[in-house]
Structures are given as C-alpha cells and as structure tokens.
Image: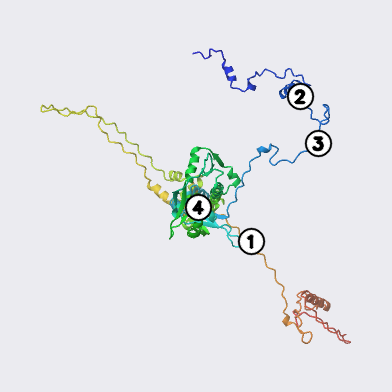
Amino acid sequence: MSTAPESGINLEDLEQHFLPAWARQSPGTNRYAKYEGGEDATGPRHRDRSERRGGPRPDRRPGGEAGGPRRSFGDRPRGPRREGGWGPPGRQEERREPIPPLPEIGLAFVPDEKGVESLARQIKLTGRAYPMFEIGQLVLRKPDRYHVTFSVLKKPDGSIAQQLWLCNLDDTLWLNEAEAVGHVLRKHFGTFYQAEKTPTDPPKGTYTFVAQCSLSGVILGPPNFHDYQIKLHKLHASRFARMPFEVYKTKVRIVRDEVVVKQWVDEQSWKTDYVCLNVPESIKLATRDEVEKHFREVHQANIFRTVESWTLSGPAAQALPTPALRLLLRRAWEDQQRFPLRVVHALSQQFAAHGLQFFKVNKTVTHVSVARPHHLDLSASPVSESIQRIVEFIDATPGCTRKRLVGSLAPAPAPAPLPVVPPPVAAPPPAEPVSTEGPAAVEPAGVPTPVAPLEAPKEPQPTPEQTALISDLHWLIHQGHVIEFANGKLETAKKPKPKPAPPAPPAAPTPTPIPDAASAPDSTAGTAEPAVPPPIESATVPASEPAPAASVEATRTETLATAGIPLPPAPAESEPRAGEATPPLTSSSGPS
C-alpha cells in the first residue's frame, strides 16, 4: 500500500489546511518589500480604507482647513472616571455579596469520652509517650471522635449577645424564632396538620405560558394572574430571604411548555384545606398563613425553648440546618486543625482524670505518658545489674529501640535447621488374587497416595533472659527512668540542672533611735518639752585631759538640731569670782 495518495496532495500541504490564514504564507515572503516610507494620508493603505468606507473621511479639525492646527490631548475635557476602570460601561465587574458576619456564639470541641478512655488504656498498656497536639489533630480528623458545644456569650452589662433556640423535635439549634418555625412547618408539618384537597373550578381563560422559579421549580402561574405577586413574595420570604428581592426576580423564567401550563391549571383546580391535629377540637384552616399563625399560638411554646449551652455530636453538628452555625463550625474546625490548643486543653483534663502524666520534650512539645521523667542516678541508687546494663546501653546508643535493645542484651538463639524429609515413594500395588466368583472392583491406576501436610513453623517464644529484660524495661518505663516515644525510640530521663542558689538578701539599714518625748524635762510651767538625748560619750578624750567646753557645747547643739528637737533656753552667764577657777567639763563616761 502506498503512503502517498494518488491525488498528488503532499502531507505537508495537508497540514497547512489546519493552520490559520496568517500561518499559511511562506516565511520567506516579505509583505513590506515594496514599502518606501514617507507616504502621506493619500497612500495605498489610506486609499483602500477610504474605498471601503465609501469615500474619504471628512476633516474634523477646528477651522475646517486641512492643514489646521491639531488640538492637543491636554486641551480635551475629560469626565469623571467610572468606578471599576476605563472599560465600557456594559462590562463592569459583578459585585459579590459581602460575607455575613459570624454569630456571636461560643463553640468548643470536646473529645468523645469513650475514645479518650480507649486511648488512655492503650497508653497505660504500652507505656509510650504520645505528643498531645498530634492526638488533638487525630481527634479532629473524624466527626465521630468529638462533640461540639454551642454556648451563648454575654456582653459586659450581662445581657446575652445572641440567643439560641432549641427545637425539641430534632434537637436542632436556631438563631431566631422565624427560622425555627419555618423549619418545623417544612420538616414536621404532618405532625400538626393534615392537608385535604377538594375539587374546585379551574381558572377561566386560555393560558399559553406561566412563570416558574428556576431555583426551586415552583410554578407561580401567569404574571397577570391575580395571586401571582403574592406567591412570588411568599416564596422569596420562605426559601430565599437571604437573596435581594430584585435579584430573585431575575431567577424567574417564562415557560411556554404545554405540560407545565397544564400542571399549573390542574393545581388551581383543587382547593387545599389544612386540618389541625393534636388539638381538642378539629379546626380547618384555608391558607398557610393561618397555619403559621395557629402554630405560633398553640404549639410554639411547647416545641421551642431558649438554652445557654447545648452539646451535639460531631455528625449532628455538621448536619445543622442553620447556615450561620455551620459556617461558624467550619471556621472553628479549620482554626483548631491548624493549632488544636483548645482540644489539647480538653484532652489534658480528661487524661489527667485517668491518671496520666504530662511533660515537655526540650521545653517545646508536650507529651502524655504513664509517668513523668525521673532521672535514675546509677552511682547513688542501688539497682540490679540488668537495669544498669539497660540504662547504659540506651545512653550509649542514639536512636535505640526496643528490638535493638533486646537483640543486643538478650539475643535469641539461632533457630535449629529444619530436617530435610525425602518425598515419600509410592509402594507398588500388591498382586490381586484371581477370583472366579465374580468381577472384582479394580482401583484406577496412577492415583497418588495422600501425603500429610507439613506443619507451619511455630513463632519463636521469648527466652527467660528476654522475658526478664522486658520486665526490667517495663519497670523503668513506668517509673519514668526510661521514655519510650510513639515512634519506638528509647531515651533515659536526663539529669535535672542544679538550681542556682538564691542571692542573699541585702542587709537592712540600722534605724536611727528617736528619743521619747515623754522623758523630756519641762522648760516652762505646764508645757512638755521634747526629751534631751543623753550626753554624748567621748571615748577619744582621756580622763586626765578634759575636753574644751566650747567643743562639747557645739557637739550637743548639733545633735539636737539634727534630731529636730528645740534647744532649751541658755542660762544666764555669770562671771567667776576673783580667785575662783572655772571647773573643767568632764564626760559622763569618764571617772568621777
């Protein structure tokens, strides 16, 4: 078979047919080879464009002259810039609706008590230390492992910021009564009311089209029908209240299908009445508005109640019909998934109730285990030789594991070689005696003899040395001397650093004694004078050499002035008699 077609079309030419027009031309062709440059507005390009438009373009420059001056762009008046850019007004960007604020409701994740109990049992059984934050992320991974608690928040004045409503029929939470009533009338309508249809006259006239909601599929009827606007507003208020009414009107479409038109006519040919249930007297209501009014008056007080806190399981919280609460739950879950601080706080309280201990590795990562690290000082604590070997081996082996420890300190004996059993040889069948009485049963030749199956090798049992080593390791782990982490690594508890001695407190200054005012002598009658301090002792003046009187008086005056005591009045000076010597001043501490 020939690869080239008989028509003479080359495969390369066939490929050119799938290219755009600008790519079909040969790359060697230069479209501007004949262009000389400097052509004025009457050149070929301008001429072709003028012919296509039906003639030359008139000159719009001021003055009407062809060679008139051009107006600069700076002189052109410009209007205000449109919002959203300089693009055409019809292509403005669609404005997105702002995200509604989250409700002021408290939310907390509480790990399931049964799951926490199972984790605590596993930690006690294995003795391993698990990081708390990884356990918190493990709990948040599946909704079955936690509960969600919704609680109200209070303002500084004590009032509730956002009320919570609980539906007693299905334990759903709501932020207002209107949404809760609408939920019950949609999901539990048959519990309180029963719809009865009776035939009535169909609408008169010929209808070729009807309006239908494209979001819900509800047929609203012709736009010129008398109750069209009522149905439109009711449908918007009950199911699409979050959407602006003008936007919702754009979602209503006109349908000209005969099947849809006939369906609307059939709906209008029946009248629906609502019979009240669970009431002493049977009452019939004509419209849904009457039904809602009756429900609020009779059943609302028994169906709804306000709560300050309510706990739901993880799947029930995710299935709440309130959009704002679901959004709040989603945001809180994403926040805790990144850093599960609140979940870890709840886990630590639950683990502590089961008797588990907590510690930090390198002062960063919090772990939970059966015991806190406690350093074992081999030089000061009398321990067995086996325990000493275990501690020394773990200290000398970085990244030590339980398997490596047992294999080094108590290796298992080499397994005995399996005996080679030769395959059984089938024995030849014995000769059968010839019987003349009748035909004998003859066994078919070539049937193999059944061979007993070989027993599977048994798992090696631990030796007594390995059992004793594992028992000593178990004791070390549960005492906190050895830590076995979740990844299987073993480490010994480090020796705590000595605490620095507290600095000595500074010496307190000696207080200056204040003389008692009650012991001061009276200077005037009826007036108490501050006490005069005792005379100053002079240890430097010898008894044989009396101190000058002026020096003693100056020292006494200075002392009284420093203590804030007023000086007593000086006595009148008297001149010594002729031939009488002045008595020397002596200190009270000197000899008399």
Q: Are marks 4 and 1 in contact (CB under 8 Å)?
A: no
The residue nearer to you, when weighing 532 against 175, is: 175
Q: Are marks 3 and 1 in contact (CB under 8 Å)?
A: no
Residue at the disc numbered 2: 56
> In whole angstroms, how far apart are the C-alphas of marks 3 and 1?
83 Å
At label 2, the amino acid type is Pro
Q: Are marks 3 and 2 in contact (CB under 8 Å)?
A: no
Residue at the disc numbered 4: 288
> In whole angstroms, how far apart are the C-alphas of marks 3 and 2?
27 Å
* Image height of 157 relative to 417, above or below: below
At label 1, the amino acid type is Pro
Number of labels in the image equals 4
Residue at the disc numbered 1: 503
Kindly report which numbered mark, 3 or 4, lies closer to the viewer in this rendering.
4
The mark nearer the N terminus, 3 or 1, is 3
> In whole angstroms, how far apart are the C-alphas of marks 4 and 2?
72 Å
The mark nearer the N terminus, 4 or 2, is 2
Percent from the top left, x then y, of residue 150? 53, 55
Percent from the top left, x then y, of residue 304? 50, 58
Kindly report which numbered mark, 3 or 1, lies closer to the viewer in this rendering.
3
Percent from the top left, x then y, of residue 70? 81, 30
Kindly report which numbered mark, 2 or 1, lies closer to the viewer in this rendering.
2
Residue at the disc numbered 3: 75
Kindly report which numbered mark, 4 or 2, lies closer to the viewer in this rendering.
4
At label 3, the amino acid type is Asp
Residue found at x 44% / y 44%:
403
Q: Is residue 28 left or right of residue 542?
A: left
- Graded by Cα atoms within 10 Å as few (under 14), some (14 to 19) or many (20 or more), the crowding at tag 1 reads few
- The kind of secondary structure element at disc 4 is helix
